[in-house]
Amino acid sequence: MEQMLEALKKIESEAKTVFGRVSDRDELNNLRIRYLGKKGELTGILKGMGKLSGEDRPKVGQLANEIRQTLEEVISRKSEELEEAALKQQIEAEKIDVTLAGTKIECGHFHPLTRIIDEIKDIFLGMGYEIGEGPEIENDYNNFEGLNLPKDHPARDMQDSFYISEDILLRTHTSPMQVRTMAAKVPEYPVKVICPGRVFRRDDDATHSPMFHQIEGLVIDENISMADLKGTLLKVMQQLFGPDREIRLRPSYFPFTEPSTEVDVSCGICGGKGCRTCSDSGWLEILGAGMVHPHVLEMAGYDSTKLQGFAFGFGVERIAMLKYGIDDLRVFYDNDVRFLGEF
Ligand code: PHE
C-alpha cells in the first residue's frame, strides 16, 4: 500500500509541474487524458487496488480522489489562463490605433471663378433677382442688332468675335440675355434678372482672354432711375469686397444704354489713396452699366414712356483678380493644381 500511495503522490507532483509549463490548449487536453483519462496514469495505479486489503483500499481510493480533484482544479485554472491569454493576443492583433495618420483622400473644390459667380448669384438672389442662362452661340440680332448695334455700327469693332456664319457667332458679351429676357417676358414687368456665362472676343494678353465670363444684370420697372442703379451696385460691391468700399460712376458709351457709365470701386489695397494696383488713381474699373436705351425697350416691345430700366455687365475674371490679388488672368485657365489649390 505504501508503495501505491508513494506512486500516487509522485504522479501528483509530476503532473503539477507538467501542467504548470503548458502553454497551449491542445497540449493541456492531451496531458489531461494522459493523467486522468480512462487509460491514464492515475487509473493505471488504481488497477492494482484489487490486491489491497479491505482496510487499505479506502485510503488509497481517498488519496486518488483528492489528487484527481486537485489536478482537475489545476487544469481548469490553467485552461482559463490560456483562454484569457488567447483572447488578449487576439485583441492585440486586431487593435486599431486611432491616432495613426489615415490614407489621405484628395478632395477637389470649386474653381475660383465658379466661387465668385456663386457668391454674386447669392447676393442678387438676396435682393429678389431671378437667375437666367442663355446660349454661347448667338445670332447677330440678339448679340448686336437688338442692342442698338446695327450692321455698320462702328462700336461693333470693339467686339470682334468668332463667327460660325455671317449671322451666327460666339456671343461677345452677356448682353444678348437682355434681348432674350425681354422677348420672353414682354409685356410683363417688373423684370429683375442676372445672367452669368461665358463670352468670347478676339483678345489675348495678360489681362484679356479670348474666353472670359460676365454677369449681365437687367431691371425693368416703373420709376427706375440712375439712383437705383448706383444704390444696387454699391450694395453688391460692399457685400463682395467689404463694407468700407465706395463706388464711382464715370460717363461712358454703350449703344444699348443711355446714359452709359463705367463703374469703379475704391482700391482695397491703398484704401483709395493711390497705389501700384490702381495706377495711383485710388479706383479700379469693374463694370459697364447704364439706363436701358428707350429704343432697346421699344424694339423688345416695352413702352418706353411708361417704363425704364437699368443694365450692367460684370467681368467675373476682373472681380476675381481684384479679390484675390492676381495680376495675370491666364492662371485661371492653366488648370495648374498648384494655383487652384490655393483657394
Ligand atoms: N456688354 C457690355 C460689355 O461687354 C457691358 C454692359 C452691360 C454695359 C450692360 C452696359 C450695360 O462691355
Image (cartoon, helix red, strand yellow):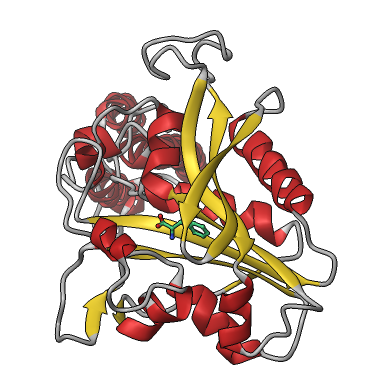
Q: Quadrant of the N terminus?
A: top left
- Report the residue at 64% width, 55% height from top: 122
* Residue 59 in view, yes or no: no
Q: At 64% from the left edge and 90% from the top edge, which residue is drawn? A: 301
The residue nearer to you, when weighing 277 against 124, is 277
**Image position of 4 with respect to 107: above or below:** above
Q: Residue furthest right?
A: 223
Direction from residue 297 to residue 26 in the image, left or right: left
Residue appearing at x 72%, y 72% in the figure? 220
- Vertical comparison of 136 with 99: above or below: below
Q: Foreground: 303 or 188?
A: 303
- Residue 80 in picture, x, y percent from top left: 46, 40
Q: Is residue 32 left or right of residue 195?
A: left
Q: Residue at x 56, y 77 (%)?
A: 296
Provide residue 280's location: percent of width, then percent of height. 43, 12
Query: Looking at the picture, how far across and down is residue 253, in whole percent?
Result: 47, 52
Please tell me whether residue 22 is drawn above or below residue 144 in the rendered image: above
Find residue 187 and report its image quarter: bottom right
Image quadrant holding the C terminus, namely: top left
Residue 32, compared with residue 96, is above or below; it is below
Give the side of residue 227 with respect to residue 175, left or right: right
Q: Which residue occupies the foreground of this view, 32 or 167?
A: 167
* Quadrant of the image occupied by residue 194: bottom right
Query: Total number of numbered labels?
Result: 0
Note whether residue 320 is visible: yes
